[in-house]
Image (cartoon, helix red, strand yellow):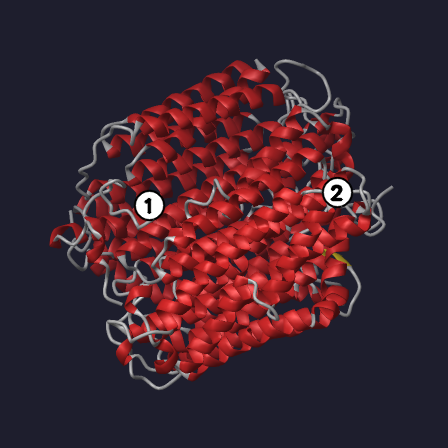
Amino acid sequence: MELLIVTLIGLMLIAALAAVEARDLLSSVICLGAAGFSLSVIDLLVGAPDLALTQVVVEVVALVLLIRVVVTRRDTSSSAPRDALRTGAVLLAGGVLLVAAAFSVGVFAAGKAGVIPPFGQPLLAGKGPVAPGVSKDYLGKAADETGAANVVTAVLLDYRAYDTLGEATVIFASIIGTYAILRHVGRREAPADAPAGGAKGG
Amino acid sequence: MNALVPLFVAVPLGAAFVIVALAHAGGLKRLTGPLAVAAVVYNLVAAVIFLGVGDLSVFVGGWGGPGKTLGIEMVCDGLAKLLLVTINLVALVSIVYARGYMRRFTRVWLFEALFLLMTGAMNGVVLAGDLFNLFVFLEIAAIASYALVGFGCEAEELEAAFKYLVLGAVGSAFILLGVTVLYSLTGHLNMAKVAQLLPAAAGPATMLAAASLLGGLALKAAMVPFHAWLPDAHPSAPAPISAMLSGVLIKASGVYALARIVFNVLGPSHPYATILMVLGTLSMVVGVLLAIGQWDFKRLLAYHSISQMGYVVLALGAGAGVVAAGGERAIAALCIFGGLFHLFNHAAFKSLLFLSSGSIEQQAGTRLLKEMGGLSRRMPATSFCCRIGALSIAGVPPFNGFFSKLVIIVALMLSGHPVLAVVAVGVALMTLLSFVKVQRYALEGAPGARSAEATEAPASMVVAMASLAVVCLVAGLAMVLLRDHLFTPAGDALLRGFEGAKDLVTGAMP
Amino acid sequence: MSMAIYLLTFGLLIVGIYAVVAKKNVVKIIVGVLIIDYAVNLLLVLVGYRTGGQAPIQAADETAAQMATVAVDPLPQAMVLTSIVIGLALTALMVAMAIRLHEKYGTFDMDRIRQLRG
Amino acid sequence: MPPEEGMTPIVRNTTRLVSGFIVVFGTYIALTGHLGPGGGFAGGVILAAAGALVVLSFGRRVSSSLITEPTCHVADAAGAAGFLALAMLGYMVGGFFVNFLPVGRLHRLDSAGIIPLANLAILVKVGAGLVGAFLALSAFRPGRRSVLDDGTADGRDGRREI
């Protein structure tokens, strides 16, 4: 199981690298799709069918959008990185991040306090130094308190429905923003001589 | 009163949804503007009324109470109230100003809807008592602002918006990474619960979480060295949005969130205090140095935003340092008062300056200081307001900027950072110098290439600017009154640290 | 093995950051932002996994107490769902901006897209 | 292939056959979100995918008789407002987002109080919103010449007239 997940994350990593380094933008976008679909398989493996489903459909829509961008447009940029300095800086920062992550997941001090619990043993499983968190209550009470068999939905739309209002608003804002960005004419050349308050453009 | 807390978020979001529907309803289209103004007026009135009420805590959906924190908590304490008043004040002024300014733009209802989404989301950010909820509302505010920066749809604006979006998205990802790690360590998202459980889980992972959160939020606050997006994004937006971005967005989603995380979640310890002070000092100095050479008025103002936010973060960091060292509470309180007072003042005068730069840009047709000149005769009201804003930011008595900078400098001396106090004085002098240049080239002198035919801005814009000018003057003169009723409760909310974090969760702790 | 899972996830994050910072093509930058998104979402869903865990959906012949002993953590899943939505929202906005940038400048190359002053 | 024209009859007929099923599937996914995997968001994206399929295969000219941008705007706003209205209705029994309907019996469609209604609102919101965004994106045609073409691209003199 863990081996399968490691393989899939490795696949995501390779697909991501290929997406970043591909010469052709279409291949880049398709490699990104490969990474996204691997992610949804991982979701399925770790007991998150809701996520797997959502990830797949979102991936499809995102790919359709991205492919429409690249497929008809002439691209004249070279695939070389911007400059050596930036690449060096980001690799250095990445190295620091990786070392910090290694410390954080307990490569150097396994099983001690203050590291991210080992994979497969979250606080919920009750083996860490801290008591199981709020999720224990969600799992135990959701059916009685909300009547939803799917605890993820119960959390999403009842216990934490306020977040979901935020989520709906995010997508609303981005769609409104997309309309705003896609207006052909942002502002008229000359000030409109319409009376105050009545000048709402079409 | 508890029941009314969610309305700070619900009313503007609801108004934004209704505006989009109204825009397609024929004759009702005219109502979108008044509706937007009405929603913001409601929020401001409610925010002022809430000042008279004690600290409130609401569990949305009723999923909380003694011993359980299943739901999302909204916390309306002193700090949240201060930010609510600031956000909604600047929002009201900006939306009134936009009634005149946005006339040249097409499809203004999109602007109004996005504006309300951004305002409502900022209200949500300052009311959030839950880490993930904080992140979600940060994202709404950010996404609305990305679109608003590019609202003019000109090439430069789109490029600035794209750059802003990409850096903002990376910052958000790091904030979510930090939240993830904190969740994996404590099993909770409620800020007070996390604060309570975190000391037991101290270790490398906590440091990683703190670094990601501080880095991401510093990016949102445009602290040097994470400031690259701000000088492009803020000037590119329409003027009322520049005022909102510089006036409140970098505060609500940057500095406020930084202060909340450091003081109330991670706990004010030495490393965090040092990080805040380094970021603050760097921003203060680098921002003003970059501003001095600018000839583009809006870009100059944007660099000054970085510099002035540096003051706020430096003061908050000094306060955290005093708390961490176990120093006198009064000194820590003074540092925090200075920081928060400057935050409020900066919201007032920077918005005022951006609004006046917008009205000059619209009437004179230029943003370059060298092409202006003699505007005090052509546009007397705008020039008068612009001058008050410039005097405030430059720290000239009796305007508000003088008092808050004075408090910060005194607090830095008292908290044992005389060198930083001297640096702060130096930066204040350079700020003054930079705004003498603005006065000299824009308002005085012979009419420039573009300003000779400029006329005064429409009434709604002048009213908006004048009301902010009044705020600049009154906030300076009524400092003691404001301190007792607005800033001391806000400072207390921070100073409680995680010692008092359990107060945030009313009776929820075992 | 369990540490390798987390470290590979961080590796994915670094690949995304590399694309955003060092690449100059608008589409590559978008790809980078999405990879960063994937990495953070993946980390979030991984920290909620419990060995041998099943989906947090109560079956008809199961009590809540039984499920609570075997199910994976539902809260990170709810967070990831929100995060995926935010990712899609960002994608839509970035795609719109990329189209406009290409229209205005005729290229996806950030270096050739004129730099703003400063 | 310009989207105004649409695609070959084979594609169109296939779309005719499957798009109905996709819509039904999306709605099913949304309405049973509290019983199993799924939810309003996933369902909404599936609806949007069906919309995108119709737009792509039939072309904008035909599809505009089915669905237009203003319709999408209004449905989008209505879905979002509906979700907010559900939250506000909670004030009847105690507060914002309080579940005001009976939780019912587990595993029944009418269980879980407001959750199915909330899923429905999100389905409408996300579906309409994304179809609208897709229409806007696919309708977008470059309007003016690019900056690089008229030689004002580099140098500061190319500043736009304000």
Residue at (64% x, 37% y) in the render: B274
Residue at (45% x, 27% y) in the render: C14
Q: Residue furthest left?
A: D150
Query: Which mark, residue D18?
Result: 1
- Does residue D128 appear in this view? no
Disc 2 marks which amino acid?
A: Val
The answer to whether residue B161 is left or right of residue C59 is left
The answer to whether residue B96 is left or right of residue C56 is left
Q: Which residue is mark 2?
A: B322
Q: Residues within 10 Å of mark 2 (few under 14, many from 20)?
A: many
For residue B184, above or below residue B425: above
The answer to whether residue D24 is left or right of residue A162 is left
The answer to whether residue A65 is left or right of residue B352 is left
For residue D95, above or below residue A72: below
- Does residue B227 appear in this view? yes
User: In the depicted view, which residue is nearer to us: A37 or B103?
Assistant: B103
Q: Are marks 1 and 2 on the same chain?
A: no
